[in-house]
Image (tube, rainbow, N blue to C red):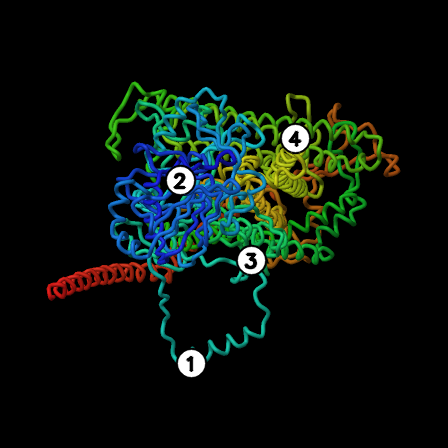
Amino acid sequence: MGKPGACSSSELSSDESSIFSFLIICLTGFDFGGQVAIGFSHWNSPFPASSQNLPSPDCVHSEASAVPPVNEHLEPVSCPASLSISPLPTCSASQETLCDSSTSTHTAAQIFVNDGLCFLTVSIHSQILQKTCHMIVIIYTFIGFYPFCLPPAVKDVNVHLERERSEGISSPSRVDDSTLLNPETHSSILDDNTKTESRLPEGKSKSSGLCFSDGKSRIDYILVYRKSSSQSEKREVFERNIRAEGLQMEKEASLTNSDVIFLKLHAPWETLCRYAELMNIRMPFRRKIFYMHRRNKFMSRMEKRINKFRGWLPRKPMKLDNNTLPDLEENESFTAPFSRSRIHHFNIHNKDTFFNNATRSRIVHHILQRVRYEEGKNKMGLNRLLSNNSYEAAFPLHEGSYHSKNPIRTHGAENHRHLLYECWAWWGVWYKYQPLDLIRRYFGEKIGLYFAWLGWYTGMLFPAALVGLLVFLYGLFTLDHCQVSKEICQATDIIMCPICDQYCPYLRLSDSCIYAKVTHLFDNGATVFFAVFMAVWATVFLEFWKRRRAVLAYDWDLIDWEEEEDEVRPQFEAKYSNKERMNPISGKPEPYQAFSDKYSRLVVSASGIFFMILVVIAAVFGIVIYRVITVSTFAAFGWALIRNNSQVATTGTAVCINFCIIMLLNVLYEKVALLLTNLEQPRTESEWENSFTLKMFLFQFVNLNSSTFYIAFFLGRFTGRPGAYLRLINRWKLEECHPSGCLFDLCMQMGIIMVLKQTWNNFMELGYPLVQNWWTRRRLRREHGEKAKASFPQWERDYNLQPMNAYGLFDEYLEMILQFGFTTIFVAAFPLAPLLALLNNIIEIRLDAYKFVTQWRRPLPSQAKDIGIWYGVLEGIGILSVITNAFVIAVTSDFIPRLVYAYKYGPCAGQGRAGEGCMMGYVNASFSVFRVSDFEKRSQPRTNGSKLFGEAVKYCRYRDYREPPDSAEPYSYTLQFWHVLAARLAFIIVFEHMVFAIKTLIAYLIPDLPKDLRDRMRREKYLIQEMMYEAELERLQKEKNERKKKKDRAHHKEWP
């Protein structure tokens, strides 16, 4: 008869052909008396033999295209075959004619084969058509025919519903992968020559991989597993229960690995509505009405003049073009929890777009987390199947490619991913504001809040960076007027004692001129002001973030959102399955952990944390020993550059080694934190996450800042004096500060650690995924050709991307919180820290955006009201920063000794003023005298200084307040030492109390909710009640009018 796969004349009887004739003509609304040709492309009979679903016409077994039973509610779906209706003038002789004997005069039906198509030619008289159309309901019920081959209305004579054709049809098998699309070739059943014939909307074609094989059912979630996995039974039960929940699925093998199977999931409209109601998802139901306050005429005129003046100014360059961003309706509408009983209240313009992709994925994930995979208590949830390797991966799809051949300004964005790349992740828009609403719509509220917080933190760094830069410039401009720096640079007759044993030579104080000038850049009269400013800034930042978060929570409908009760962790359930008690919230029995067991585990965990802190201290102790040893080594070095700058070389190398130790210990800390957290056996996932977060932050914070604390508060403080040095293990002399002070070492430590840490983090965040994805692309090109990736469906492309790390946003938050600590805790010693943080964050935002959009699989969109436990950590750092900055100013810097000298011992003593002129003689007063003959034998320098100074050195100077060797109590503390010590303690107490009082006052004066937001919330609540009431009245009135019309029609029919 024809080609394989074409239908023959024996497949349809004459009675069935007549039924099809009447049915198709009546459904399409034709009124003609000629012949009609109806063509089917490889079409099988749609009549189900039973109530079970049959394979779709293209032999792809998917619930999206399966024919439902007769007794179910039927809805139109896509056409499974090519269908064309066109008038035929005559019948050729080669065509086989089937004529019904009873209607041979008026009706003729033909079936013929042409080019692999099966044609049914029908000739019906218009009078017979009119007489038989009223029987269509009976025929429809009798044969169970489902009109899925035609659209609801056809007006043209020629109708073309094209369908992609194939040459071979494979029968489904009974194995686990029976629903694969062409499992023999591991590709779609569609032939390569006809893959581009689909007339789906642009961006939604089959080749894009965003829909099922029918081209209409959107893929909401992807599950990936391997056929070689041993968990097939659990997977089969899980998938059977997925179907029972209303989800539709379709399977397809990977194009690059025959062992990898993709399970595509789609949630129909009814399923989405049912679970949206259960999850209390808020959906838009009425456009917002913005209430404007009435203004008087004067204010109106002033506002018009201001707006006119603004028109002359250039537009805000940082603001995104509103024409580029899509109209996000949910942000312009009032929302309410979705309800099927009140579905008429919501703005449902299109069922396919009413629930956006993020909401659809969240609903599907909610279903998957509650589907059982095995008989038994709590044997449910996708997370458990991922943990036992039943499934290899689970993720929602990206919305197509982020690249486009056409520019976005002229052709628009192809999808939201492309729009996010052009308006957010592209480096050319680094100065633009972030499209937070679009980020929230694509990635969910949790990720949107992270980027909102990061953007807010970056914006608040602008004033801090500006003030810090001004403090630095103030030190730079006043450098030539600093009396202390002048005296150090001119002190050629002051000989300093060696800073190490034996190998270090005597030095002139003037050799420290450069270090004294550098120290003045950071330690000047504006340092105290900047420390107070940063303490207040930290409070203002946190308080205004609470207000910003409240606005976002209102705009994103998170005000009334409550986090769902977490399910019990599988590990907790397995450990304590023998003991149960009733859950006070759900009222269901659940595993119970005894009090003694819980707190014994907490004690062991706390002991582990304490031990790891001791490991950090041991590492710092090792760095201290390194600094002590290498000072002598560099002092005897062959190169004059290193020999003359031995202390700087020691500090620089020690900082680099310390950084390497920090990075190595971070890897160890992560494993220890995992071990200790699992040892505690937290009950829920949120408890596990909070416990792990706290441990990791504590470990990394101590690891990162321990050396900085040592340099700031211990370096040079407990070294003793020449002739009576304190030693480690009675062997190594403790390291001393530079003659110009210890603040230079602290600045070097902070600068190097901050720059190296941020550079390394940025490389690991973006460089590692880039290298991984590049290697995957290289392997695919080598195995499948240069253009293989372009033909991959979207799920294959996303699967080849890197998954989001197992801890979610933990690494991103931790990096920024540690940076916040560096920016605030020691900011008095390094005013440029906010500037470095600002520059890093400008890059960090685009790095994270690029990573999320291009390098990572799309993470599951999830909701959150705030940044969680991190806000409490930020508050703790803000309190700690006040204390540390007080100690840095009082102990590390020379601010207090200079103040005491100016008011008590300087030329202006007793005059109540302290200027640069009052600091004359400060350097000489701050150095004590030591007799060289009093040196210990192991500290005696090998040279007596005669080569450098012309004669042997008899006396040298060192930083301290001690009596001279010829006094009654040689080398004892002077009265000035006790004055300085008392002033330092008094400054710490006054500074802390003053700053804490300012912080508390600011926190009290700044409300958590802006007044306009509070008014908007009250007005919205009022308007929602009014709108719901009016909508209900409108519905009741409409129903009343309809009943009245029906009654009137029934009344008129009573008359003849």
Alpha-carbon span between mark 4 and mark 3: 35 Å
Residue toward you, 165 or 173: 165
User: Which of the two labelled residues, at mark 2 and mark 4, occupies the earlier sequence position?
Assistant: 2
Q: Give the mark, 3 or 2, whose residue is nearer the N terminus.
A: 2
Quarter holding residue 735: top right
The image quadrant where one finds the C terminus is: bottom left
Cβ atoms under marks 2 and 4 closer than 8 Å: no
Q: Which residue is mark 1?
A: 298
Residue 55 visible in this rendered orientation of the protein: yes
Q: Residues within 10 Å of mark 3 (few under 14, many from 20)?
A: some
Amino acid tagged 3:
Gly
Residue 977 numbered tag? none
- Find disc 3 in the rendering and name its residue: 412
Residue 23 drawn at (x, y percent):
33, 48
Q: Secondary structure at mark 2?
A: loop
Q: Is residue 303 above or below residue 287?
A: below
Q: Give the residue drawn at x 26%, y 30%.
A: 583
Residue position marked by numbered label 4 in the rendering: 783
Front residue of 460 and 474: 460
Q: Amino acid at mark 4?
A: Glu
- Circle nearer the N terminus (1, 4): 1
CB-based contact (under 8 Å), mark 3 and mark 2: no
